[in-house]
Amino acid sequence: MDSLNFSAGPGALPADVLTQVQAAIGQVPEVGLSLLGISHRSDWFTAVVHEAEQNIRSLLRLPDSHAVLFLQGGASLQFATIPMLLLRGRNKTAEYLRTGYWSAKAEAEARIEGSIRILWDGKTHDYCRLPSAEELSCSPEAAYFHYASNETVEGTQFHYVPGRNDVLRVCDMSSDFLSRPIDADQYDLIYAHAQKNLGPAGVTVVILRRELLDDVPAGIPAILDYRSHLKAESIYNTPPVFAIYVALLVTRWLQDDIGGLTAMASVNEAKARALYGVIDQFPEFYQGRALARDRSCMNVVFSLPSKDLEIEFLRRATGEGFAGLEGHRSIGGLRASIYNAVTLEAAETLAQFMTEFQRRA
Ligand code: PMP
């Protein structure tokens, strides 16, 4: 029996994409070689990178002012690189929203580089909610403003764009990238690793306003300097050929099979409604973690009245073919991740299982 994959990441990939990847591992017909053994200097791979970039541009409606890079090192490397590039030597303070596990990690890395101000700290609310726009007083003097659009561990998601338009806006979009349309012009730098909505682990997309590169401080190692990657069109050193190729297939799937990000967002909302619907129907039994207003359409985080019930839930869920429902190791509980490739049918099947489990408990 095939399991339904609710893993928080690396997450589910579309079935059609997996079929194409299997074939390409055998042989990419245009090249006559296995996907795993094709040079990154080949014309074929140059075209792969080019098409993947064009697809991301068109899905997000990116203006020409923004460049797209395919990098390595995961989102965690961006936690460190961004303050090196945008804070070092500036004599300014960067403002961070501490809304959960991952944005706190980003902020800790930035502290190594320079002065940081926490604009809002969700720790006092146990990271169950996000700030409203009125709660934020962002400074016009900040070096930049950083936030995570979706907190993967706690299951919160911004449903508006925080920050101010006259300060560089930097966003960790790792766990909701390409899950809904955005107004790209509002962002100066977006980073997102692939392993939620875009592909396997190994590649991280950085989208940045080209102007940012005008005053990169001296002494940044070339491998961390976005200018090296921009100049080399993301083939500065050996890139993760496999991961970028899979990402290309996922972008084609988003365009051709799903019909773009507006269509993707409505499927994602329907999946979230199915699961939160059960949580809201049985609030004594399923305790949703996030405040309803700030709930994530990607990670549905909840707990049960006792640890024993959670163990039993996971045991039965696994037996019925649901995978990846354990909560993050830092907070426990349960988490259903419903990234782009998880079908509405899979979410509805899980919702049904939850309803029945509650009835029988
Ligand atoms: N940011 C977010 C929102 C994440 O969910 C994660 C990992 N799940 C990271 C950053 C860290 O990513 P990586 O493992 O690619 O460094």
Image (cartoon, rainbow, N blue to C red):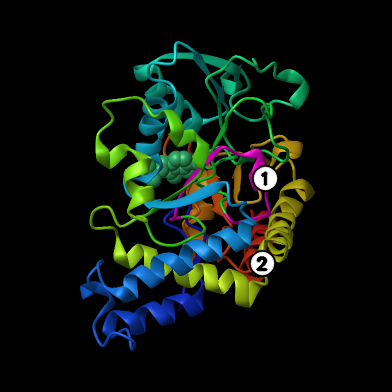
Q: Looking at the image, which residue is at 52% across and 64% down?
A: 54
Q: Is residue 83 above or below residue 116?
A: below
Q: Is residue 130 visible?
A: yes
Q: Is residue 12 visible?
A: no
The residue that label 2 is drawn on is 260
Say which quarter of the image contains residue 168: top right
Kind of element beneath mark 2: loop
Q: Amino acid at mark 2?
A: Gly
Q: Is residue 340 above or below residue 37?
A: above
The residue that label 1 is drawn on is 286
- Dot 1, how many residues are within 10 Å of its Cα: few (below 14), some (14-19), or many (20+)? many
Q: In the rendered view of the protein, which quadrant contains the N terminus?
A: bottom left
Q: Is residue 138 above or below residue 38?
A: above
Residue 166 lies, in percent from the top left, at 66, 25
Residue 353 lies, in percent from the top left, at 63, 63
Give the spatial CA distance, label 1 vs label 2: 33 Å
Kind of element beneath mark 1: loop
What is the tally of numbered marks visible in this picture? 2
> Is disc 2's CB within 8 Å of ligand 1?
no
Q: Looking at the image, which residue is at 55% across and 16% down?
A: 118
- Ligand 1: give its quadrant: top left
Q: Looking at the image, which residue is at 71% across and 48% down?
A: 279
Residue range highlighted in magenta: 178-195
